[in-house]
Image: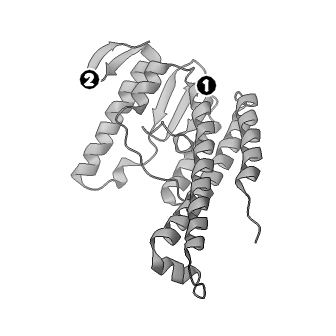
Amino acid sequence: IWSPTIRDWRDVIEDYIEISKKRRNNKFAMFKFQTNLISDIVLINDIIKGYKDLIENPEERKKKFPTLEVTEENIKYWEEELKSHKIILSALKDIGDGIAWRLLEYKRSLIYNMCVNNEDCGPLVVNQGLITELHALGDYANDLEVVNFVYHGITKFLLIGDLTLKYSNGDINFVEIKSQKNQRGSSLKERVERQKARADNLITIANEGEGVSSGVFLGVR
């Protein structure tokens, strides 16, 4: 069975980079582009998980290849494929980071405060949460007041909330799509409240040029 190589992906990624720059002010094109990027990232995450399972779990090998006598050569091949797909994933998310940097107009102080002490929510997978987020992304893409956006799951550093939005008046907003009414447990509720407080602080930094940075209130523009 044919499967794309890292060289095949290189050409696709080069095209993606060009599209992400050339169509940056076309909302419909960016919506289509980001949903396609999400699909690729989900696929690569699934492939990475599959190779990890083969390398680390003998039972998974028996399940996938019941008649194969696994050798060191097989494992070495899987390890090389795992490395290759991690490189592809990193390159795809670099494109997402580029979209975010341009949307945020390269404001380093804001971007620093978006990255510091963040919790990685794990790889993108197809579940109800992702479907809900994609529906919300479509709604915001159709909002006349929204001129640009980036879905955080296609980036490496946007880990607060699910979407960054830019409005026609220049304001920035960070949106958490998951409904709080579905959260359970006091620790989870506290985590949601902490995330909201951080998002509100980042909105202040983005739109007013001041806020709390590393525990100190200061102007950061």
Rendering coords of residue 58 (x, y %) = 46, 78
Drawn side of residue 140 relative to residue 115, left or right: right
For marks 1 and 2, the one nearer the N-term is 1
Position of residue 14 relative to residue 107, above or below, is below
- Mark 1 is surrounded, within 10 Å at the Cα level, by few (under 14), some (14 to 19) or many (20 or more) other residues, namely few
Where is residue 42 shown, x and y percent of the image? Answer: 59, 56
**Marks 1/2: CA distance?**
27 Å
**Residue placed under numbered mark 2 in the picture:** 215
Say what amino acid the circle numbered 2 marks.
Gly
Give the residue displayed 34% in from the left and 38% down from the top: 195
Q: How many marks?
A: 2
Classify residue 189 as left or right of residue 69: left
Residue type at mark 1 is: Arg
Task: Indicate the position of residue 11 as horizontal and vertical percent values.
Answer: 77, 45
Q: Dot 1 corresponds to which residue?
A: 102
User: Which residue occupies 37% across, 38% down?
Assistant: 118
- For this orientation, the residue located farthest to the front is 72
Q: Tell me the residue at 50%/65% (across/down).
A: 52
Q: Quadrant of the C terminus?
A: top left
